[in-house]
Image (tube, rainbow, N blue to C red):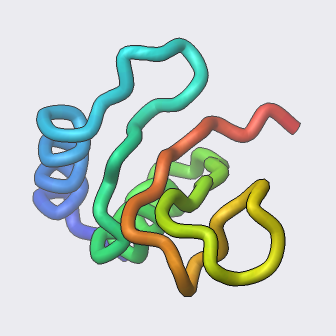
Amino acid sequence: MMTFEEQVRTFNVLYTLYRSPSNTSIFKGVPISMRERVLKYYKTMGQKVKLRYRGPRTHGTQSYCVLQDATTFAVYVRTW
């Protein structure tokens, strides 16, 4: 469980550096090193999100990037 201070710090970093100007994603270009922190933040908040990984596509098809190859990711609200 994250403390309130950790939640505030996480949100401030995400909002300041990685907020998305689009209407679809919440944040984009978030470094993969922040993945666990972001997932923990949204779990604590009780909001379900979907992560889409971005980076080189060296494994399998060229239509998506797998976690193992990802350098960044985008965060989307789950609507289902």
Residue 21's quadrant in the figure?
top left
Taking depth in this image into account, of 38 and 31 the one nearest to the observer is 31
**Residue 61 shown left or right of residue 39 in the figure:** right
Residue 15: image location, x then y, percent: 22, 34
Residue 11: image location, x then y, percent: 23, 44
Residue 43: image location, x then y, percent: 53, 61
Quadrant where the image shows the N terminus = bottom left
Taking depth in this image into account, of 14 and 2 the one nearest to the observer is 14
Residue occupying the point 14% across, 41% down = 12
Residue occupying the point 40% across, 76% down = 36
Residue occupying the point 73% across, 40% down = 78
Residue occupying the point 47% across, 16% down = 22
- Above or below residue 11? Residue 69 is below
Quadrant where the image shows the C terminus = top right
Taking depth in this image into account, of 77 and 30 the one nearest to the observer is 30
- Above or below residue 44? Residue 58 is below
Residue 40's quadrant in the figure?
bottom left
Residue 52: image location, x then y, percent: 61, 54
**Residue 17 shown left or right of residue 54 in the figure:** left
Question: Count of labels shown?
Answer: 0
- Above or below residue 21? Residue 48 is below
